Amino acid sequence: MREEIHIGKLIKKEVGGEKGKLPWLADKVACTESDIRWIYTRQHINFERLMKFCIYLETDFFAYYSEYVREWVLLSEKPEYSGGKIHIGALIRAKMNEEGRKVDWLSKKTLCSKSTLSRIYQNEHIGAERLISICKHLKTDFFAYYSEYFLHQIQNKNG
């Protein structure tokens, strides 16, 4: 089993020691240089912010999560990305409905309250650790949607 994801270290590695890159990046992702240094210490960050890092560093950080989940759960297929903005709660709900699963089942599997799971259905994004757990139990690589969305954004930016 591979080591857990530490997204801050991956971002720091990508930024490297290039002089001038840190102020440029801070400006692009709308934060300060000290915020970026703090992010370097974080195992996971907000997915909206992570998408900004992906776009401006032209690196698919979601692919690391996707690979981790796929290896952990031994998935072979990637879900289909239909284009458009990601609403992870709706995707989780659709998968639950497709499998005929109830909130009670996922609540027991993820050790998450039913009310929290019900709120997740309303959210466009959720935390990485919680999404990893949901991926495991639903045997679905939800990170692949973010990865595909990023690739779509880069194509639009460069195309």
Image: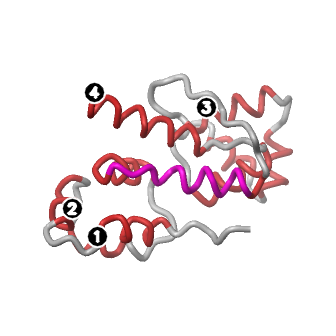
N-terminal of the pair, mark 3 or mark 4, is 3
Task: Check disc 1: other Cα within 10 Å, few if <14, some if 14-19, many if 20+.
Answer: few
Coordinates of residue 27 in the picture (x, y in percent): 17, 57
Residue occupying the point 22% across, 55% down: 30
| Image quarter of residue 39 | bottom left
Magenta-tinted stretch: 58-71
Q: Amino acid at mark 4?
A: Gly
- Please name whichever residue, 61 or 109, is drawn nearer the observer in this view of the structure: 61
**Residue 104 in the figure: left or right of residue 155:** right
Mark 1 residue element: helix
Q: CA distance from mark 1 to mark 2?
A: 8 Å
Q: Locate the N terminus and report the quarter of the image it occupies.
A: bottom right
Which residue is nearer to you in this view: 52 or 35? 52
Secondary-structure class at tag 4: loop
User: Residue 35 — which label?
Assistant: 1
| Disc nearer the start of the sequence (1/3) | 1
Q: Which residue is mark 4?
A: 159
Residue 92 in the image: state x and y as whole percent.
67, 37
Residue 79 in the image: state x and y as whole percent: 66, 33
**Real-space Cα distance between discs 4 and 1?**
31 Å
Badge nearest the viewer, 3 or 2: 2
Q: Which label number is shown at residue 149?
A: none
Q: Earlier in the sequence, mark 1 or mark 2?
A: 2
Residue highlighted by disc 2: 26
Q: Residues within 10 Å of mark 3 (few under 14, many from 20)?
A: some
Q: Identity of the amino acid at label 2?
A: Ala
Based on the displayed image, in which of its 4 quarters is residue 15 positioned? Answer: bottom left
Whichever of labels 4 and 1 marks the residue nearer the N terminus, that label is: 1
Tell me which label, 3 or 2, sits earlier in the chain.
Answer: 2
